Image (spheres, grey):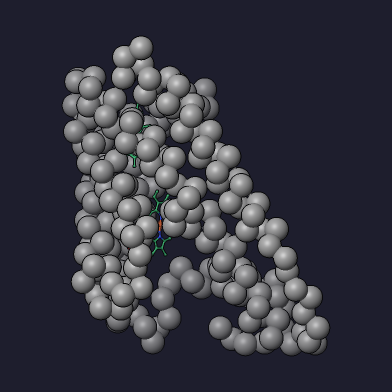
Amino acid sequence: MGFGDFVDGPFWYFSLAVFVVGVSWRLYGMLSLASHVDLSAARGSAATGALKANLVRFFPRSALGKLLRLPVVAGYLFHVGLFALLFFAAPHVDFYRERITGFGWSAMPTWAFILASEAAFLGLMLLVLHRMMHPVTRTISRRGDYIGSWLIFIVMLTGCLALARTYEPLRILHFFTAELLLIYFPFSSLMHTFSFPFSRGFNGAHYGRRGVPA
Ligand code: HEM
Ligand code: HEM
């Protein structure tokens, strides 16, 4: 079996399994952490607090607005660009139809795909530079915070190399790096993709019940 067949076949199923089982296992572990019974009288609603935190946290506090402008704008550029190209770029929609869902949906035009990719690249590079150069983020960042960013950067870069869709080894290379990302994902801070509503909800419920406008 050549490397291409390996990447298209067994390694794809392996990485998909690690991703699905790994993410489920991490979420299960997180949700089954022992919770304590709160004996104090409720001064507010935990549910409302959880919901509110989930929505409000999409924007920085106004007092921090200026300070956080760069990471917030860069964060949205990266994530919105990534979302658009992952789910609406024609080659990716083709992939879902052929290998996952069995059906497709309308894809965006190529110019929009390129624009979304550029936004994602710009946002990601600004985020990583900010992380490396800002004294506070640099101090609190660990190796894992960089590995996830570099991995997704490499997947996007190999995606650009495959854009011509004429040279098979470049398609294989892009697919292979995407599979490495899937395998790394459940064990890393990339889990924030699935865990963020729960962590925001947890904090929101904690403060909501105590009537703290947090
Ligand atoms: C709805 C889903 C997601 C939400 C709400 C979310 C939210 C966030 C937030 C708030 C940050 C911090 C940004 C900052 O420093 O200002 C972040 C960073 C990051 N996210 Fe996401 N994210 C999501 C999905 C994803 C996905 C699917 C990936 C890639 C597979 C991803 C990759 C990253 C990376 C690499 C960083 C760190 C960049 C850096 O500071 O070095 N995120 N995300
Ligand atoms: C700038 C970002 C990206 C660009 C320009 C891009 C471009 C492409 C292109 C052109 C193809 C088709 C290859 C072909 O059929 O010859 C493709 C396929 C694919 N891409 Fe991306 N991509 C990007 C990001 C990503 C990301 C972030 C992921 C996953 C995390 C991903 C996963 C895949 C997968 C699984 C395929 C299918 C491979 C196959 O058909 O064998 N791509 N991409």
Q: In the image, what residue occupies the spot 46% across and 68% down?
A: 58
Left or right, residue 190 beside residue 202: left
Residue 103 seen in the figure: no
The quadrant of the picture occupied by the N terminus is top left
State the quadrant of the C terminus: bottom right
Give the camera-side residue of 85 and 189.
Answer: 189
Ligand 2 sits in which quadrant?
Answer: top left
From this viewpoint, which residue is outermost toward the top? 1
Seen in the picture, residue 212 relative to 78 is either above or below; the reply is below
> Residue at point 30% right, 81% down?
66
Q: Residue at x 44, y 40 (%)?
A: 183
- Could you tell me if residue 178 is visible in this image? yes
Instruction: Find residue 108 and report its horizontal and vertical position in percent.
Output: 33, 37
Asked if residue 186 lies left or right of residue 32, the reply is left
Q: Looking at the image, is 132 positioned above or below residue 149?
A: below
Horizontal and vertical percent position of residue 16 = 49, 33
Residue 43 at x, y percent in the picture:
74, 87
How many badges with numbers are in the image? 0
Q: Considering depth in this image, is 181 or 209 the residue closer to the camera?
A: 181
Q: Residue 94 in the image: state x and y as whole percent.
A: 39, 26
In percent of the image, x 27 and y 68: which residue is there? 131
